[in-house]
């Protein structure tokens, strides 16, 4: 099938640290959306895709709905030109916007995104991919697309039935306990991710941070990539470094709280997109200069920071309220 995809870059989007299970074969990418196996290639402003039948347990759709599923997953309905036009006009942001043209924020299945980022803590991208594949092979379901095999991400109830040792065998280390406890909460309904979709940002962040293995950084990643909260601004080593170098050059020490407050006010309602552009641009520039470090390694303040999460939630919610009041006042003038 062919799916119109103007103003979109498939490779940049899949290589930008949002998802970790897609595999590239030549110009094609093979993976799953929910439990729908997909083989996809970009041909100009069109996505050429093949799908295989599946139960589509996660998305409630089947292969007949594949074009809509793929379009939604890659957020082809986001007004990308408008979003990019809302970015601050400064050298760092302008360079990132130009470099990342066509990169979109993927709409990921909520449980899959949450579980993946719990597993990502203090891990390199290559390791996250290995963990994801190990979990999929051991607890997911195998699907075939053409001559390739892919594996669905296991449901929360499947992980909840596993033992901690089973999960440790997937190279999770200490993350195994966190993933197991969170899976049990989600599968029991106490962690109702679907119901949380209607919560305000501050309440959603608080709910997420109450889950085992979720601190401020992971919560913001899940808010951005799974709940489509485009203001969410995850801060890891790349973003922290970029913000300090570009916006705090004259200040020797910048706290996490200062970075969070600055990002909420300066980047505004599409801060999540701005963050992803800055993140991907900084990571690729570093890779090309042979100074690459892992894209998922958090700064020290992002190590499962439960207390920090509560403080940031309180402060950023007040900052956001003041920002929205100011925007409302400006609009009335």
Image (cartoon, rainbow, N blue to C red):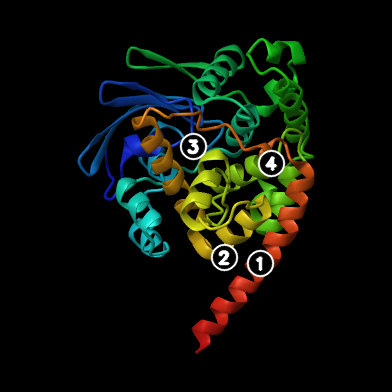
Q: Residue at x 75, y 47 (%)?
A: 308
Of mark 3 and mark 4, the one earlier in the sequence is 3
Residue 163 lies, in percent from the top left, at 76, 14
Mark 2 residue element = helix
How dense is the environment of label 2, judged by Cα within 10 Å: few (below 14), some, or many (20 and up)? Answer: some
Of mark 1 and mark 3, the one earlier in the sequence is 3
**Residue labelled with disc 2:** 265
Q: Nearer the viewer, residue 294 or 25?
A: 294
**Residue labelled with disc 3:** 18
Cβ atoms at labels 2 and 4 below 8 Å apart:
no
Cα separation between marks 1 and 3:
26 Å
**Residue labelled with disc 1:** 319
Of mark 2 and mark 4, the one earlier in the sequence is 2
Cα separation between marks 2 and 4:
21 Å
Of mark 2 and mark 1, the one earlier in the sequence is 2
Residue 62 versus residue 203 in the image, above or below: above
Cβ atoms at labels 3 and 4 below 8 Å apart:
no
How dense is the environment of label 3, judged by Cα within 10 Å: few (below 14), some, or many (20 and up)? Answer: many
Cα separation between marks 4 and 1:
20 Å
Q: Residue at x 41, y 65 (%)?
A: 86
**Residue labelled with disc 4:** 301
Quarter of the image for residue 149 reads top left
Q: Tell me the quarter of the image containing the N terminus.
A: top left
Cα separation between marks 3 and 2:
24 Å
Residue 204 lies, in percent from the top left, at 69, 52
Q: Nearer the viewer, mark 1 or mark 3?
A: 1
Cβ atoms at labels 3 and 2 below 8 Å apart:
no
Residue 267 versus residue 10 in the image, above or below: below
Mark 4 residue element = helix
Q: Nearer the viewer, residue 332 or 75?
A: 332
Residue 203 lies, in percent from the top left, at 73, 55
């Amino acid at each position: 099938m062919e799916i119109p995809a103007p103003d979109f870059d498939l490779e940049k989007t899949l290589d930008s640290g949002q998802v970790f299970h897609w595999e590239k074969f030549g110009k094609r990418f093979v993976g799953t959306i929910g439990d729908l196996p997909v083989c996809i290639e970009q041909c100009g402003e069109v996505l050429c895709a093949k799908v295989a039948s599946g139960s589509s347990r996660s998305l409630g759709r089947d292969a007949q709905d594949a074009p809509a599923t793929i379009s939604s997953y890659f957020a082809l309905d986001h007004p990308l030109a408008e979003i990019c036009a809302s970015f601050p006009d400064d050298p760092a942001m302008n360079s990132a916007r130009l470099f990342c043209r066509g990169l979109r924020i993927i709409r990921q299945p909520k449980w899959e995104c949450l579980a993946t980022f719990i597993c990502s803590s203090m891990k390199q991208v290559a390791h996250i991919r290995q963990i994801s594949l190990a979990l999929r092979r051991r607890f997911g379901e195998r699907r075939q697309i053409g001559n390739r095999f892919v594996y669905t991400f296991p449901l929360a109830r499947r992980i909840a039935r596993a033992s901690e040792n089973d999960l440790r065998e997937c190279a999770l280390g200490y993350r195994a306990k966190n993933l197991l406890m969170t899976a049990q909460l989600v599968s029991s309904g106490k962690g109702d991710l679907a119901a949380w979709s209607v919560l305000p940002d501050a309440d959603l962040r608080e709910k997420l941070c109450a889950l085992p293995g979720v601190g401020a950084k992971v919560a913001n990643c899940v808010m951005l990539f799974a709940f489509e909260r485009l203001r969410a601004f995850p801060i890891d080593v790349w973003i922290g470094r970029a913000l300090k170098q570009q916006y705090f050059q004259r200040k020797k020490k910048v706290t996490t709280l200062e970075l969070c407050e600055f990002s909420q006010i300066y980047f505004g309602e599409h801060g999540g997109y701005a963050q992803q552009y800055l993140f991907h641009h900084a990571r690729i520039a570093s890779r090309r200069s042979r100074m690459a470090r892992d894209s998922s390694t958090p700064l020290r303040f992002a190590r499962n920071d439960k207390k920090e999460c509560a403080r940031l939630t309180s402060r950023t919610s007040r900052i956001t309220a003041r920002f929205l009041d100011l925007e409302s006042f400006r609009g009335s003038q």
